[in-house]
Amino acid sequence: MARLVMKFGGTSVGDLDRIRNVARHVKREVDAGNKVAVVVSAMAGETNKLVEYCRAISPVHDAREYDAVVASGEQVSSGLLALTLQAMGIDARSWQGWQIPVRTDAAHGAARITGIEGERLVERIDGGQVAVVAGFQGIAPDGRIATLGRGGSDTSAVALAAAIQADRCDIYTDVDGVYTTDPRIVSGARRLPRVSYEEMLEMASLGAKVLQVRSVELAMIHGVRTFVRSSFDDPDAIRAAGNQPIGTLICDEEEILEQQVVTGIAYSKDEAQISIRRVADRPGVAGSVFGPLADSHINVDMIVQNISPDGSTTDITFTVPQSEYDRAMAVLEAEKGKIGYSAVEGACDVVKVSVIGVGMRSHTGVAAAAFNALSAKGINIRAITTSEIKISVLIDAAYAELAVRALHSVYDLDKVATA
């Protein structure tokens, strides 16, 4: 017997037939003797619709009332799933975030979980009742409903798993695991049996859409073994195969016996490049550029600085999310007098491609192989950043797919075995 948290996203509960399919997955685990809590998102498209209602009523709206509206989508799906389970003869009830309670900070619309008081939930689960929990929400210090931001149901599930000391958190999505890269770009992409927390965190932050970044951070901090699997697999077929899950386990590095040097290739199209030309090379110049951007809550990623031959001026190039490009340019224009640059240039037709793998720590030549592979394809690199387990390059968007395929091939990722 195991204590499990099962999380189902909006596509998985998109209509009544899919909710019935989710209930079959839950019943499969209950029949296997497991103690189950389920976290659900709103039905596909519901949150977007509710957000648009709020914007149509008032473009500048009270964030607390916004949360009250958009949190209702998960309330509906959790109630429907509980009803479906009851109709199948399973003892189940729905829980809203405030009923558990899931405590959050005061940042309505983008709240962070500060604690979960899961004692009552554990008592019910251990007594054989399935808890169906509305994801994406909790209760703020002001006693009002608070939502966790888009993708927050993954975070809800992992946080709940940590709070109730679950043996595993299963994230059911519309894919059957984490792949070496996007299979839509590389037909030879392979599903990875296991990925370390650190690698998954890099992959999620660098463009892989399988898991939300905050959920991976929580899983790593609390050691929550997280399994990515497909909700569209046939529950009866899984039962017949001995209830063995098919997917990717996100776990501690020590659990991975044969670690690949490179685990995967990620890419992000949400990138924009900004270059500030001929700034006086003096102490504090970087602060004068990046301080105002930070004050405006604009995330800066790749940074490259080139000093002129005589050392008098410097060029600073960096990236921001494409959605923040216009705002970043406006901030820099407003600060031109303080920064003292002669020109600012920008480009939105860029893509960040990243090579990720904990094996880089103990192997040489990984970066050289990447640069040689891109050079052989005639792909120019605009900027480079590295860490212990990743290499990211900024390139022209037109070469994105070619770069992904080249890097996937040079590290033999199409030969990675699945399990």
Image (tube, grey):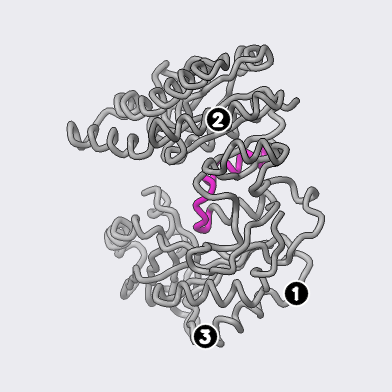
Task: Mark yes or no: residue 385 visible.
Answer: no
Task: Mark yes or no: residue 358 visible.
Answer: yes
On-image quarter of the C terminus? bottom right
Q: Position of residue 282 (x, y in %)?
A: 47, 69
- Tell me the tag on residue 409: none
Q: Which residues are magenta?
A: 205-221
Q: Residues within 10 Å of mark 3 (few under 14, many from 20)?
A: few
Q: Position of residue 225 (x, y in %)?
A: 69, 39
The local secondary structure at tag 3 comes to: loop
The local secondary structure at tag 2 comes to: helix
* Residue assigned mark 1: 364
Disc 2 to disc 3, C-alpha distance: 48 Å
Q: Amino acid at mark 2?
A: Arg
Q: Position of residue 116 (x, y in %)?
A: 58, 22
- Tell me the tag on residue 377: 3
Q: Which residue is at the front of the view, 161 or 392?
A: 161
> Image point 58% across, 49% down: which residue?
176
* Residue assigned mark 2: 24
